[in-house]
Image: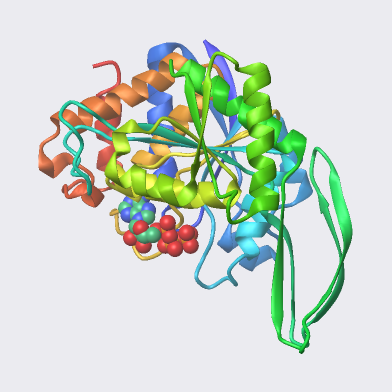
Amino acid sequence: MRKHSIAVLPGDGIGPEVTGEAQKVVEAAGGRHGFEVEWVPFPFGAGYWKKHGETLPDSALEEMAQCKALLLGAVGDPSVKPGVLERGILLRLRFHFDQYINLRPARSYPGIELPVRLPEGKRIDSVVVRENTEDFYMGVGMTSASGEVEEAFEVRRELYTLSGRVLARTEPDEPLALQMGALTRRGVERVTRYAFELARKRGENTVTLSSKANAVPFLYGFLDEETKRVAAAEYPDMTLKVQNVDAMCYTLVCRPSDAGVILCPNLFGDIVSDLQAALIGGLGLAAGGNIGDGLSMFEPVHGTAPDIAGTGKANPLGAILSAALMLEHIGEAEGAGSIQDAIETYLERAPIVDRPLELGGGAVCSKVGDSVVRNIGV
Ligand code: ATP
């Protein structure tokens, strides 16, 4: 029996409900494929913050680092100032463990009504590879009521520390805000390599870079150039297509089944992957992974959905699919595949009443998890 120690941070809102179902399914896949998971639970989120005034202690990061992966639900709460938990937990984890890839696959499933019509016999099977540490998510910005800004900044990343001073003013005085985006050569290289390797693994020979170099020439012009350089030098047998992000959104809606590996800078990747989630029929179906060379973290694309927390309406399939990505990442590809297949079989065969409520069915969160478990190995 192979043993894996996995950190689990269920978080807030529907996080604990969907994560519980994902754990149940992982255990069932383990029973079938010869591995066992030891869950190492972490209580962080809104409740912990309110009680202890702490988002995520350093000691927890050290404990998590001993695990093979982290399974996360969602963090955030309407009663906590926006950003406190997201920055204190989610972004802290991403940056601390240098999870430089945000992987967001989108697959359509049989029997799920889509907002778009696919050509006969085609399905959506695309994946956004979103750079996860740079671009406009550096957290460097400032506002000025007087129109004059003079401020030092420092951003620490695993690859480098970026520091400097911003000195700017409007003439005549005009209140303003500035936000800085940065990309670096090594930052672009590693995400580009990941996207090409993934395309190869999927049996494809194309990566489409989706940015906006014509309108944001310094940042995304650099991205285009560096991506093209890596593609030409290291993947000469493969093709790099470059498409502006606006055109990408248009073609994704018009011809969603044509998309494969889409490489995006941080901000556009966030937006394009939500569009993909809508195209496959529901936010509750969309899975995600934050991947780095150290601890990687797997979480559904949706947030805490406080409006449906505790009602049983949460669809756990995105969390279950995220757990499947996690299994693949830790070397349990068969277990991951069996979860994918189980979801496919379940959605194909289940009568309406057994499908997730989010997808027009009648099954609450735990029933959906049970159905997936029943279909493992079928
Ligand atoms: P957060 O601020 O944590 O992102 P949010 O409510 O603003 O939370 P989401 O959690 O992404 O954003 O949810 C947006 C809406 O989509 C929710 O109000 C909910 O109705 C629906 N939703 C999200 N996830 C699911 C799910 N797993 N199952 C069913 N519906 C969902």
The colour mode here is rainbow
The C terminus, quarter of image:
top left
Specify whether 340 is left or right of 130.
Answer: left
Specify whether 256 is left or right of 362.
Answer: right
Q: Position of residue 363 (x, y in %)?
A: 20, 46
Q: Position of residue 206 (x, y in %)?
A: 47, 24
Q: Position of residue 6 (x, y in %)?
A: 58, 31
231, above or below 223, in the image? above
User: Where's ligand 1: which quadrant?
Assistant: bottom left
In front of the other: 203 or 345: 203
The residue at the point 64 percent across, 47 percent down is: 220
- The image quarter containing residue 372 is top left
In front of the other: 14 or 133: 133
The residue at the point 16 percent across, 47 percent down is: 361
Q: Position of residue 267 (x, y in %)?
A: 57, 52
In front of the other: 61 or 242: 242
Specify whether 211 is left or right of 187.
Answer: left
